Image (cartoon, rainbow, N blue to C red):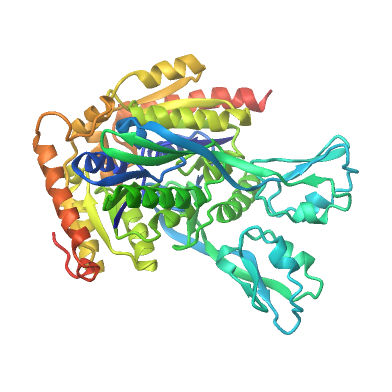
Amino acid sequence: MHELVVISGKGGTGKTSLTATFAHLAENAVLCDLDVDAPDLHLIAEPAVQRSGPFISGRVAVIDSAACTGCGTCGEVCAYDAIHSEARHFVVETTHCEGCKVCVVLCPEKAIEFPDRLCGTWYESNTRFGPMVHAQLDPGQENSGKLVTLLKAKARERAAQLGLELILSDGAPGIGCPVISSLSQASLVLLVTEPTPSGLHDLERVAELCRHFRLPSTVLINKADLSPGYQAAIHAFCQTREIPVVGRLPHDPAVTGAMVRGKAVTEGPDTPFGAQVRQIWWDLRSQLEAPSSSLSKESRS
Amino acid sequence: MIIAIASGKGGTGKTTVSASLASVWKRPVLAVDMDVEEPNLHLFLKQASVSRDAAYLDVPVLDQALCKLCGACAELCQFKAISLMGGHLLVFPDMCHGCGGCMRICPEGALQKGQRELGVVEMGITADGIPCLAGRLRIGEALSPPLMGKVRQRMHAHASKYSLDILIDAPPGVSCPAMTAVQDADMVLLVTEPTPFGLHDLRLAWLAFRPLGKPMGVVINRAGLGDDRVQTFCQEKGLPLLAEIPYRRDIAEHYAHGGILAHLDAGMKATFEHLVEQLDRIGGAVNHA
């Protein structure tokens, strides 16, 4: 089984529009939206939910105001500044609570409860592109990466059940916990970038992250015609780091047009842009099927 | 006055708006890049020299000689950073969230304070005299809020020392890091684009930030690109639309060359000056309330 994970460091480079397009072009793939914080892939894939469930992650401290004597120990030991006094007792600000249990254990009155924390909902769905797993973190909740790990496990399970060979995952922006979790066991990481100062800067950081975890990566330069200078700089960077460039796509309003219609850009009549994406998809497929050792050898530009 | 520039969706133009606002701000202002995973503000607010200070999280270090294997620390730890296995106590400092509980409760004092590097805090000043502060997460570090906490400490100290307003460029999303970035703000400026993704994530941001009770306003970037559902949403929710940046190829190219949008032409400068006035009006009302 192959796992292709699409990330970018910088947001808005076109991860989700491209993942949706690959989903349309792929056969035998399970689609997976790992941007559980601000997921958008469902807006194109229009999943029909088959199963769903609560995502419970960690716990949260809750002070029983009747039992609290106002001694303030909890506030002193909290490393997250999550506990404040209110009238004669103390209260926990749930959004700041890390769920470390220190106040629970050290409260002399045993006045702090420690219930499960409901953080969001996971979904198993069907789409016109095939099966999909996705989730929605409740707004303001901790994006711990555990939900990402849960979705990846469900995607593998689903792929195994259905005999599908590919898991196609849309990742989150950034390089922190949820992104790190999305990379685990990836066969290939597709780094979508754009020729801008931010695009290059953030590509350097996600490329370093992939190197840190020893994962093969390949670069797609989206909106490539925006700046010939930065496009050249991205190629130079990839060459130095021996990261292949799988392709370039122009800045084309048709991508947004398709998004507004709720479609992948390759759905509908053939366009030059669509043909370019198809070519990139074929090249990605062959990189995925190649032995992983050949991935880091040559930079094509 | 502290303004946080946030968005649900990434790449909507938070940094573009932050850099431009800083460049036309009427009072002395501190520009803070709180997107520690992918800090980009310095690419537009360019600084000749930047001071860098490493930031650390306190994590436990085990003194084997003192440990009596009671397992109290492993039982307390909610983050799988300590485990008692086969007569050995194992500490995984990378998993630690820095709560300090294990060090507090160890009856033998066998866990001492060590450090894990979170990243660096960067401080510089632009040629126009705008002080800039940023956090830069170490690659491989999973937790961004602790480093953001260090940036916030520096931010408050510097701004109060020099009586500065603060502009915070927040990370994308609506979870913990974004909430951490906006918590100090007097008002939140949401940057979006008129597309289905932009609207969906604007709604998430509105849901996440609304309970904070801070005034919010919206900037629509790439106006004319998609549809008008974002405008309708803002009207329905009573979210003031404070500025629109048109969808134009020359704007995208200006950005692609590291330019500050407010410097592109007279029209853009006027757009951001007008936005500053609007923010002053709303923020002033908050500060005098």
What residue appears at the point 15 percent right and 49 percent down from the top-left corner?
A: A280
Relative height, residue A227 to residue B224 (above, below): below
Q: Position of residue A202 (x, y in %)?
A: 35, 53
Relative height, residue A19 to residue B104 (above, below): above
Left or right position of B136 against B198: right
**Total marks drawn?**
0
**Where the N terminus of chain B falls, by quadrant?**
top right
**Where the C terminus of chain B falls, by quadrant?**
top right
Instruction: Tell which of A147 and A200 is nearer to you.
Output: A147
Q: Position of residue A179 (x, y in %)?
A: 42, 53
Relative height, residue B91 to residue A106 (above, below): below
Q: Is residue B166 visible?
A: no
- The residue furthest bottom is B65
Q: Position of residue A52 (x, y in %)?
A: 48, 36
What residue appears at the point 27 percent right and 30 percent down from the top-left corner?
A: A259
- Which of the 4 image quadrants contains residue A134? top left
- Which of the 4 image quadrants contains residue B88? bottom right
Relative height, residue A212 to residue A82 (above, below): below
Instruction: Tell which of A194 and B61 is nearer to you.
Output: B61
Q: Position of residue B178 (x, y in %)?
A: 52, 42
Left or right position of B108 against A174: right
What residue appears at the point 62 percent right and 72 percent down from the top-left corner?
A: B91
Q: Is residue B21 visible?
A: yes
Left or right position of B26 against B257: right
What residue appears at the point 88 percent right and 37 percent down from the top-left corner?
A: A66
Left or right position of A109 against A63: right
Instruction: Tell which of A202 and A267 is nearer to you.
Output: A267
